[in-house]
Amino acid sequence: MRPTFMGFDIGKRGIQTAQKGLDITGQNLTNWDSVGYTRQRVEQVAVAPGAYSTRFGSTKTAIAGQGVDIAGIGQTRDKFLDKRFRELNAEEGYYDQANKILGDLETIISDFEPTSDSGLGAMLTKILDALQPSTEQADSDTYALLVRSAFKDMTQTLQYLNGKLENIAAQQKFDLGISVNDFNQTIQKIAALNESISQERDILNNSHYGPNELLDERNYLLDELAKYGEIDVATNADGMVVVKMNGHTVINGKDYDPMEMAENQNGTVSLKWVSTGDRIDVTNGLLKATTDFLNGRGPNLAQDGETPYRGVLYYKDALDTFASKLVEIANSSIPIMDSEGNPTGEYKKLMGAMSDQPNADGKYVVDPDMPITAANVSISDEWNENPSYLVFDQGSLLNNHILDLYNNLKYEDITFQSRGEQFNGSFKDYLTNYTATLAQDKLFYNSRLEASATLKNEMNDRRDEVSGVVTDEEVANMMLYNKSLAAASRLMTAMDEALDVLINKTGLVGR
């Protein structure tokens, strides 16, 4: 025989379950646009008769049908979609950061354009206009002064552009330090959430459900962490996650391993794990993009830590090669004559490299034999002190040497040799080549950014189909739970009426 009041217990369970369903539906509706929120569901199960009660029941069905129970409040998430989203987030983070760095470079390399108003192209045009090999006053001091002024403007422009490239490098190193700090703060928060989630599960005594709000916060941080680099996430039985980056364990329960940025002696930057000091080879994300283009020397790789990407170092090399070739041509154009008016086989040193240390007199001198870079290129001390140093002694031959210098700077097919790259063409062709190269790279990475962003957004939409709140569905659930509540309440009323008949009216018939 069934227990007398079992029906009331069934009704009570039904009312409690329906009420909790309404609570969770309201929770979903009020958090439909909360960042990182995952749709929650009441996991309902039928109450199974206990083995002990079944054993001693008068029939096998006497205590069947004991109502409903709540196993827990679950979340609707798909681990595969989470994994794919984080992979795409890292990919988008890489191309987004690459585009930002190339955009910064573009503002400078635009000054390489031969048609620019104030860049290298404009300074080259100014030199060619000043030379004017057909002038009849090519042996005058005024002519020499104009030419010297044009060359001096060119050296200052090279130094200025080199300084801007160094500023970009400094800014990106600063930003990289901030990104590393943000990465470390994120993994610290995830490790703290790991511990809190494990403790909450111990209190709830349920290893399959909750605490949902802490899980949402942790998942949101894991999504954010993925943009720094590609990560692998695994969940332990205690609810804690283990996060690895390129095989290295970054988070293990409540423990975490931060990274640090190091600037090497050769000017490159690297990332290292604090615990081991090992260098980090990030496979994707904004950290990889920053190091790739900060250390990017293109085909001119020469030192450890440099990368084959055309980044800051690559365009610094381009400036250095331009400056070096300019000095080489300028210093091999105007011959030196002996006292009898015959060429000595040597040429006037019009340009050179400014020393980085003062001499014994406290002055900085220009050395034509020092390695030339865009940072140190300058006109020679002799030419700086005497504008007419340019002027050749014999006026009848002057225009021939000026014409050679003019042609070399404007027309000649010159070989520009870098460490691993060679270009043949005029100075203007050389400048055009680098602006075109950057434009091509920018176009490529921008197209990859758009493609990866589209894929990430599509994957996020697929995640939202599973994990996001659909208001129409929640309203339907609310109506369903309301009807369940009404039905369970009606069951309680029916059981009350039946029990009233059983207790108060049994045996009254026939009196």
Image (tube, helix red, strand yellow):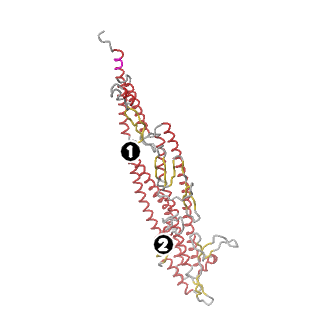
The residue at 34%/18% (across/down) is 502
Q: Is residue 272 above or below residue 317?
A: above
Q: Residue beneath label 1, please?
A: 466
Where residue 324 sits in the image (x, y, percent)?
55, 74
Q: Main secondary structure of the magenta part?
A: helix
Give residue 95's mark: none
Where residue 305 sits in the image (x, y, percent)?
53, 64
Where residue 74 sits in the image (x, y, percent)?
42, 39
Left or right placement of residue 507 versus residue 339 in this view: left
Please state the extent of the stretch shown in magenta in the rendering. 498-502
Left or right placement of residue 286 versus residue 353 in this view: left
* Residue found at the very far right of the displayed protein: 361
Q: Is residue 161 above or below residue 50?
A: below
The residue at 54%/48% (across/down) is 255
Give the residue type that dot 1 points to. Answer: Val
- Rounded to the nearest angstrom, the CA distance separating label 2 from label 1 is 52 Å
Give residue 421's mark: 2
Hey, which quadrant is residue 146 in on the image? bottom right
* Residue found at the very far left of the displayed protein: 510
Viewer-nearest residue: 334 or 1: 1
Tell me if mark 1 has few (under 14), some (14-19) or many (20+) residues whose alpha carbon lies within 10 angstroms of its own: some
Tell me if mark 2 has few (under 14), some (14-19) or many (20+) residues whose alpha carbon lies within 10 angstroms of its own: few
Q: Is residue 389 above or below residue 201?
A: below
